[in-house]
Image (tube, rainbow, N blue to C red):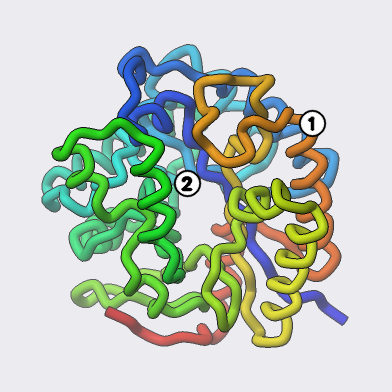
């Protein structure tokens, strides 16, 4: 029996981008952990024969010191997506002209660093707007993957704000970080946006069927902190519900799923960043093994192609 499909992607957020969103000083020097994170992630994936999608930030691709790490991702056979140039979670406030420049700068830098032109996009902090969709459609993108259909976005934002030293203006900019309560009403299955005369495929980051709670690995690791048994039960339940409801899960990873407090002390405000990297690798390994046992795991671009060759479960939206 052919297993159902699942896609796996990783938002390659760098140290500086986390500091920037958190309102911390020093991000302007663009401190990086890509030289540590990328080889570790690639080795992890190669050991499990997994090909995934890496959403790359243009600012990182534009810096010479990151070129070798980013080129190694493409050389290993992974898909490269666009994660914006400046990694600002208030991308929804940009005008169309600003978005054109933002995506074009990112594309140019990513192509130079990796040799791949991105066909998929994910907004930082799940930021999305009609203007973004219009620009993506006009620039020939195959799919967007910026939506997270959960009701818990405001709670995640409140936690983030509580740990950050943000000014009133910075809080305003980040007011849509992780989305609004209404995001929980979005479709959980892939669908197409109407963008003028065009249609743009949306592949949401999957949340728990029925409950709409997050199931990306950073969230599951938070539950693992309470109890590995709880994290295991939660993620495996989500996968069973996906199979029962015919949802093809799109699972999201982050570099911090592979890094611990022994790798960087600057991000101790993140859940699970006080645990060593080895602990996190063991937990991620167990969860992804469960995913691979029940699904055929492929990159988002391949997932998009297979969806386009058949019937989408959800039709036009927006």
Q: Position of residue 44 (x, y in %)?
A: 78, 37
Where does the N terminus fall, quadrant-wise? bottom right
The answer to whether 14 appears left or right of 175 in the picture is right
Residue displayed at 71% across by 51% down: 226
Q: Which mark is residue 81?
A: 2
Q: Position of residue 11 (x, y in %)?
A: 51, 44
Residue displayed at 78% across by 36% down: 279
Residue displayed at 63% across by 27% down: 37
Q: Which mark is residue 84?
A: none
Residue 196 in the image: above or below residue 231: below
Which residue matches tag 1? Answer: 278
Residue 295 in the image: above or below residue 89: below
Q: SS at mark 2?
A: strand
Mark 2 or mark 1: whose residue is earlier in sequence? 2
Circle 2/circle 1 CB separation < 8 Å: no
The answer to whether 236 appears left or right of 274 in the picture is right
Name the one closer to the observer, 76 or 159: 159
Q: Position of residue 218 (x, y in %)?
A: 60, 48
Residue 20 visible at all: yes
User: How many neighbours does mark 2 have within 10 angstroms: few (below 14), some (14-19), or many (20 or more)?
Assistant: many
The answer to whether 63 appears left or right of 73 in the picture is left
Residue 142 visible at all: no
Q: SS at mark 1?
A: helix
User: How many neighbours does mark 1 have within 10 angstroms: few (below 14), some (14-19), or many (20 or more)?
Assistant: few
Q: Position of residue 109 (x, y in %)?
A: 37, 29
How far apart are the alpha carbons under marks 2 and 1? 28 Å
**Which one is closest to the eye, mark 2 or mark 1?**
1
Where does the C terminus fall, quadrant-wise? bottom left
């Amino acid at each position: 029996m052919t297993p159902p499909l699942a896609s796996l992607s990783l938002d390659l957020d760098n140290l500086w981008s986390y500091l920037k969103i958190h309102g911390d000083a020093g991000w302007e020097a663009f401190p990086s952990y890509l030289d540590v994170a990328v080889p570790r992630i690639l080795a992890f994936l190669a050991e499990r024969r997994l090909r995934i999608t890496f959403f790359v930030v243009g600012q990182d691709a534009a810096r010479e010191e990151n070129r070798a790490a980013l080129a190694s991702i493409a050389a290993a056979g992974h898909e490269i997506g666009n994660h914006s140039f400046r990694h600002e979670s208030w991308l929804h406030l940009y005008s169309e002209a600003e978005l054109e420049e933002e995506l074009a700068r990112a594309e140019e830098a990513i192509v130079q660093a990796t040799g791949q032109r991105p066909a998929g996009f994910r907004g930082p902090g799940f930021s999305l707007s009609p203007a973004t969709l219009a620009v993506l459609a006009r620039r020939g993108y195959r799919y967007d993957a910026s939506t997270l259909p959960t009701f818990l976005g405001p709670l995640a934002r409140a936690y983030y704000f509580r740990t950050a030293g943000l000014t009133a203006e910075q809080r305003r900019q980040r007011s849509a970080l992780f989305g609004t309560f209404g995001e929980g009403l979005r479709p959980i299955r892939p669908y197409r946006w109407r963008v003028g005369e065009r249609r743009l495929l949306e592949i949401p980051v999957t949340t728990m069927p029925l409950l709409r709670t997050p199931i990306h690995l950073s969230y599951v690791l938070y539950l693992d902190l309470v109890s590995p048994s709880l994290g295991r039960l939660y993620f495996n339940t989500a996968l069973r519900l996906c199979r029962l409801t015919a949802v093809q899960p799109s699972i999201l990873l982050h570099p911090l799923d592979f890094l611990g407090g022994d790798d960087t002390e600057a991000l101790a405000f993140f859940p699970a960043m006080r645990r060593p990297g080895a602990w996190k690798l063991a937990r991620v390994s167990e969860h992804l093994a469960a995913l691979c046992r029940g699904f055929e795991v492929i990159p988002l671009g391949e997932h998009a192609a297979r969806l386009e060759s058949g019937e989408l479960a959800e039709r036009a939206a927006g």
